[in-house]
Image (spheres, helix red, strand yellow):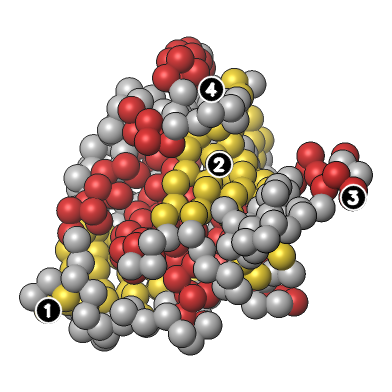
Amino acid sequence: MAGNNFGKLFRVTTFGESHGYALGGIIDGCPSGLKLNFEEINNELNRRKPGQSSIVTQRKESDEVIFLSGIFNGLTTGTPIGFIIKNKDHNSKDYFNLKDIYRPSHSDFTYYKKYGIRDYRGGGRSSARETVSRVVAGAIAKQLLKIYNIFIKAYVSSIGNLILSDNQLDLSKIEYTPIRCPDRKLSEKMIYYINNIRKKGDTLGGIITCHIKNVPIGIGEPVFDKLHAELGKAMLSINAVKVFEYGSGFVGTKIKGSNHNDLFTNNETTKTNFSGGTQGGLSNGMDIYFNVGFKPVATIMNKQKSIDINFFKKKFLVKGRHDPCVLPRAVPIVEAMSALVLYDNMLNNRVYKI
């Protein structure tokens, strides 16, 4: 299977399935001499792991990363960093009744048609559990970006029809509630909404907003490898993502050019930031910001109609433990993919070293 690699100079390859022995990855291109903060890596994994609250899947995984290579005495050696995360709480029997059924809006049908075989246990390679490897790699990229004072903050800005106001957000409060929304009152409404939908066997989608601060001017490449295009590809590679919108996005389509243009100040900043931190595909020194839209989780806990591999009509009921809403656990994934894009593009400028 191709398509398991991400990045050009800071390159990540992931492997493993949801119900296999382990998931893992190889990071190539990490410079030598970085003193890794393992506590920060574990913290990122804890933000993504299942079972962390009542509003996510109750699968219990410690998600402890085991590094196999590329690190000596806590420092990166410049050689490939290999790592694994073992699966410990997977109940494959929950999926036996689905081995011949195509679940609606899952990858079952397309995987089987492309490869002639599929791992039906939890979705196999197409499971969102694959993203655990991205979070490890992204956590290391974050530590590299911190050297240049670049910080990435993502948060849940909407769940269903509950939408966060952008007025006076305090991003230090993102982790105050399990929903990872910086508004406590709205967070309580979101949690209640998710729990209510979960009891009905249904699911919800929403939006994660991401802000990136202190990106130097000129990061990215013109034409095909524009920085916002690379970010868009990264976000759309995340499970359940249907929308990527940066800068003024769809709202900008309703504004006249005279009001939409970002006018320069005498210190090379701009009075407004409708461009979302990029111009001509390159970072312009302003904050980069974008929205990532997630569909409702396809796995619902109600009876559904579908077909099997012989095209016979079937009714089925999903068993097991599943997220009623993926957004709280997807926040660190959005940050991780952002970090991978940014550091890879900084290396491509060939001027950033430790």
Q: Which of 200 and 135 is in front in this view?
A: 135
Q: Which mark is residue 257?
A: 3
Looking at marks 2 and 4 on the same chain, the residue that comes earlier in the sequence is marked by: 4
Looking at marks 3 and 4 on the same chain, the residue that comes earlier in the sequence is marked by: 4
Q: Which of marks 2 and 3 is in front?
A: 3
Q: Which residue is label 2 attached to?
A: 209
Residue at image point 60% right, 45% down: 292
Q: Residues within 10 Å of mark 3 (few under 14, many from 20)?
A: few
Q: Which amino acid does label 2 sit on?
A: Thr
Q: Are marks 2 and 1 in contact (CB under 8 Å)?
A: no
Q: Which amino acid does label 4 sit on?
A: Asp
Q: How far apart are marks 1 and 4 (CA)?
A: 47 Å
Residue at image point 30% right, 49% down: 44
Q: Is residue 149 left or right of residue 300?
A: left
Q: Residues within 10 Å of mark 1 (few under 14, many from 20)?
A: few
Q: Which residue is label 1 attached to?
A: 72
Q: Distance between the residues labelled 2 and 3?
A: 25 Å
Looking at marks 3 and 1 on the same chain, the residue that comes earlier in the sequence is marked by: 1
Looking at marks 2 and 1 on the same chain, the residue that comes earlier in the sequence is marked by: 1
Q: Residue 202 carries which label?
A: 4
> Is residue 248 positioned above or below 178 on the image?
below
Residue at image point 12% right, 71% down: 74
Q: How far apart are marks 3 and 4 (CA)?
A: 42 Å
